[in-house]
Image (tube, coloured by chain):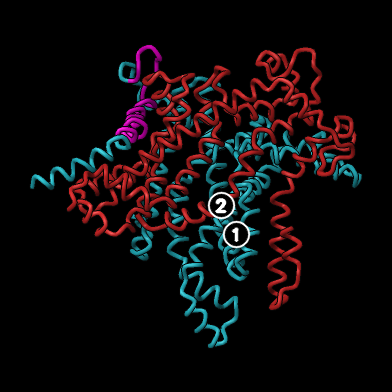
Chain colours: A cyan, B red
Amino acid sequence: MLRMMKKNAGLSMLALPGFLLIIIFNYVPLYGLLLPFKSYRYNLGIWNSPWVGFENFGFLFRGDVLYRVLRNTLLYNLTFIVLGTTLSVIVALLLYELSRRFVKAYQTILFIPYFISWVVAGFAFRSLFDMEYGVINRLLMTMGEEPILWYSEPKYWPYIIVIAAVWKGLGYSSVIYYAALMGIDSEYYDAAKIDGASKLRQAFSISVPIIKPMIVMLVILQIGSICYSDFGLFYNVTLNSSLLYSTTDVIDTFVYRSLIDLGDIGMASAAGFFQSIVGFCLVLATNTIVKKINPENSLF
Amino acid sequence: MTTEAATLPKPKATPGKLFIHLIFIVMCAACIFPFLVIIGTSVQSEGDIVKYGYSVIPKNFTFDAYRVILHDPTMLLRSYGVTILTTVVGSLVGMWVTTTYAYAISRKDYRLRSFLAFFIFFTMLFHGGMVPSYILMVKWLGLKNNILALILPYLISGWFVMLMKGFLQTIPDALIESAKIDGASELRIFAQIVLPISKPALATLGLFFALQYWNDWWLTLLYVEKDPLIKLQYLLIRVLKNMEYLNSAEAIEYGLVKPGMMVPSLSARMAMCILAAGPMLLVFPLFQKFFVQGLTVGSIKG
């Protein structure tokens, strides 16, 4: 018994620093979820600031900004999930057909955008889309077309944002699936070959079903964060141009702007609260559904 | 070189395979094209950029942009300093707290195992968001304009803990049991047995941490207003957004350029981008193997 206690104490001591950091940086901030129900005064602190009930949410829901940012956030994330997952599985399946040395070469190049920050990605996209000197506008001009004012025309941005996201994430996500494919026992394929199954047939009847649990798991995780966006993508690639907000403003950029630029803590915290709660419900819901269909694929 | 090798006919080359190669060659070209434009523009003369726009191949090759920036690189070096310091300290401390925590929850004979595992897992499902974290950092911890604000928030995260736990679970129990029979303390077992055999996983974790800290501009954006603490990536945001930033009074005041110096701002922006991002872009791909390894280990269900 004494040995048991001692053993546990040793492990607890090891886990302690991490435990404390998690409390401070993940659990203490949860207290701030009271913020949207308060009229926050900097000098009074959260607890002593007066309660205002749902007033902040009233402001949030009455304006048309919430509709805009919610629509953008959800549509972009749905596109990323569907398109991103499909493309990375396809790329992984294609890589699987090639010999190791080519895979390595292609992967190295496709991985480059993953290693850079969204700021450098902002430079990369600006070099293409810059209105005066960008490669695309210069190309349009040589062809005798009118240059396009990319950074002030919202209608092009849904495409540019999706391209940017795929460009940056494809290398990484396809590697995850490729690694899973590498783990498949080659006997399956040998058997299929004997039966005369085509490559395409093999991909759909062997490869995809085997990596399906992983696809499901990653999709659940993405659905869980469907209310969250990659702030850097929407802030840096768009140069935070306010003319583009109708198609590029998402919850995160809206919360950031309300908090830092406008100092509107009530609005920012109400939107953040909404994001946290809806996000959490979505993870639980998706996981429950998956569990019903196939318990083995569920996350928890 | 890659493309050349890829187009060479292989012994078993089939039309299908060649088509796959073609797809990848196009994808790879699209992937790196913007970077080539950045590099090409940085060595182009200002007049040519105005005339022909940004391009991959410079008409008149010049290092003017680099010369201007490196003439007095105080600010750039200081940003490098802050970035390197936060990256090294953050990665090392982060690896320690992540690995110790992951090790504890990977040990099947640890009584708090399931509680601590849930404790970290829950943070992946539910978080308070930006505003509460901001108030925590600025108001309660008072870390505005403090270098700790650029380190602390990233030290432990659910993803990294799960990644390490996935690996540490594969260590045979017998190894730890035998050490315990010899009377070694937990700390000793961890430091002398677990850490040495976890080197590949630690390399992966270290790279993830380094990448995260190196590429971070978000924490600077939120918590830093004072120049000496500005990280490279944040410096780049300023250059990216403001075309004429390198010619502005602000840039002169920060010592980024000398007063009275006319900066070739179009090429200098790109040169700045390369000076800030280039070194790491050369280093990280060398370690790609570890990333791939890490992804495979980390995908084990928690």
A34 inside magenta stretch: yes
Any mark on residue A87, and which? 1
Dot 2 falls on a residue whose secondary structure is helix
Instruction: Rate crowding at label 1 as few (under 14), some (14 to 19) or many (20 or more) other CA atoms within 10 Å.
Output: some
Q: Please state the horizontal and vertical placement of residue A56, each as a whole percent of the image.
A: 43, 25
- Three-letter code, disc 2: Gln
Any mark on residue B104, and which? none
Which residue bears the numbered disc 2? B288
B128 inside magenta stretch: no
Which residue lies at the image location 72% right of the left edge and 71% below the top edge?
B18
Write down the region rendered in magenta. Answer: A20-46
Q: Residue furthest left?
A: A1
Viewed as shown, does residue B3 lie left or right of B131? right
Q: Are marks 2 and 1 in contact (CB under 8 Å)?
A: no
Residue A39 visible here: no
Q: Please state the horizontal and vertical placement of residue B63, each as a whole percent of the image.
A: 81, 32
Dot 1 falls on a residue whose secondary structure is helix
Q: Please state the horizontal and vertical placement of residue B291, each as a whole percent of the image.
A: 51, 51
- Identify which residue, A179 or A85, lies in the foreground: A179
Eyeballing the image, is A257 above or below A148? Answer: above
* Quadrant in which the N terminus of chain B appears: bottom right
Q: Are marks 2 and 1 on the same chain?
A: no
Residue A126 visible here: yes
